[in-house]
């Protein structure tokens, strides 16, 4: 899920998120997992505020680029 900076804080991300979780619920899913860049503090806070919990990390090395991803999980009621 990504929202351009100029649209962040306007409810666009929440609307997209709600639609995605609604689709998972409709499909009978009981759990979801995602990865987010660990350095993206706004995204991590967005998901934590919605009940997602950290479950692990992984670091990737691509020539000229290194990043750490935070894996988060959510129980879907």
Image: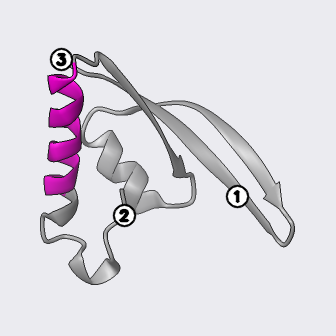
Which quadrant of the figure has residue 43?
bottom left
Q: Bin the neighbour count of mark 2 within 10 Å (Cα to Cα): few under 14, some 14-19, many 20 and up.
A: few
Mark 1 lies on residue: 67
Residue depth check, mark 1 versus mark 2: number of the one nearer the observer:
2
Farthest residue in the bottom direction? Answer: 6
In the displayed structure image, the side of residue 8 where residue 5 appears, left or right = right
Q: CA distance from mark 3 to mark 2?
A: 24 Å
Q: Residue at x 87, y 67 (%)?
A: 63
Name the mark on residue 2: 2
Cβ atoms under marks 3 and 2 closer than 8 Å: no
Cβ atoms under marks 1 and 2 closer than 8 Å: no
What SS does tag 1 mark?
strand
Where is residue 69 drawn, in percent x and y? 61, 47
* Mark before the other along the chain sequence, 1 or 2: 2
Farthest residue in the front direction? Answer: 27
Q: Nearer the viewer, residue 59 or 63?
A: 63
The vertical placement of 62 against 56, above or below, is below
Name the mark on residue 77: 3
Q: Bin the neighbour count of mark 3 within 10 Å (Cα to Cα): few under 14, some 14-19, many 20 and up.
A: few
Farthest residue in the right direction? Answer: 63
* Mark before the other along the chain sequence, 3 or 2: 2
Decide whether the magenta segment is chiefly helix, strand or loop.
Answer: helix
Q: CA distance from mark 1 to mark 2?
A: 17 Å
Magenta stretch in the rendered image: 14-27
Quick one: quadrant of the N terminus?
bottom left
- Is residue 17 located in the magenta-colored stretch of the structure? yes
Q: Nearer the viewer, residue 21 or 38?
A: 21
Q: Bin the neighbour count of mark 1 within 10 Å (Cα to Cα): few under 14, some 14-19, many 20 and up.
A: few
């Amino acid at each position: 899920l990504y929202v351009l900076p100029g649209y962040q804080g306007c409810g666009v991300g929440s609307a997209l998120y709600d639609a995605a979780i609604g689709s998972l619920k409709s499909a009978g899913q009981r759990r979801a997992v995602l990865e987010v860049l660990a350095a993206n503090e706004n995204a991590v806070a967005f998901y934590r505020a919605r009940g997602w919990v950290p479950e692990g990390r992984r670091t990737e090395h691509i020539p000229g680029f290194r990043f750490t991803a935070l894996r988060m999980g959510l129980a879907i009621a």
